[in-house]
Amino acid sequence: MSDRIDTAVAMFNDGYSCAQSLLAVYGPSFGVERQAALRLAAPLGGGLSRTDGPCGAATGALLVLGLVHGHDHPDDEAGAERIRTLTQEYLRRYDARKGSTMCTDILGHNLSHPGVPERVRDEQLSSETCPDAVRTAAELLEEYLDRDVHRAMNER
């Protein structure tokens, strides 16, 4: 397996959010400096800043897919369709592996409720679930990146 996967999990275990861990590890390879990646992904951890939203590991991985495949012109309809399709496919695969794309479903605790984040932290209720979510998101991301490398090599 990739060193990047283990590095992302280690970053989460060091206290970064799941989204930060993914974007900070993969972003520099695609033009986003580590510090900028940490700031960009900061609102995404904990189910969109503890609002009962999508899993930060999944959204962090989607940011990387956007760096690789996102379009940067409003008239690029093919590019917009490409990233939509990749996003939908990635989320379906993540859901199949984790049982959901939503933080609350994966963690088993709704971080938007008063006292829950503190309880999750104090009782270490995320100590296995969240690193596994980061690992799963990174493993799937690696599959996409490997596929891109193979496609590029075959086009030569």
Image (cartoon, rainbow, N blue to C red):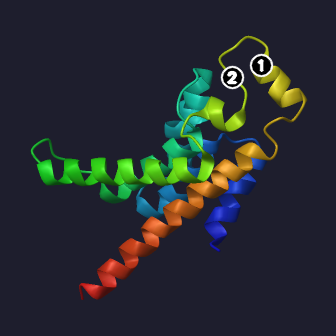
Tell me which amino acid carries mark 2. Leu
Is residue 43 positioned above or below 146 on the image? above
Residue 72 visible, this orientation: no
Which residue lies under the disc numbered 2?
111
Determine whether label 2 and label 1 are within 8 Å by CB.
yes
Residue 33, given in percent of the width and then of the height, sits at: 49, 53
Q: Is residue 15 left or right of residue 41?
A: right
Q: Residue furthest top?
A: 114
Q: Nearer the viewer, residue 109 or 71?
A: 109
Is residue 114 positioned above or below 152 on the image? above
Q: Residue at x 62, y 65 (%)?
A: 4
| Quadrant location, the N terminus | bottom right
Is residue 51 positioned above or below 105 on the image? above
Q: Is residue 33 left or right of residue 156?
A: right
Q: Secondary structure at mark 2?
A: loop
Which residue lies under the disc numbered 1?
116
Q: Quadrant of residue 75?
A: top left
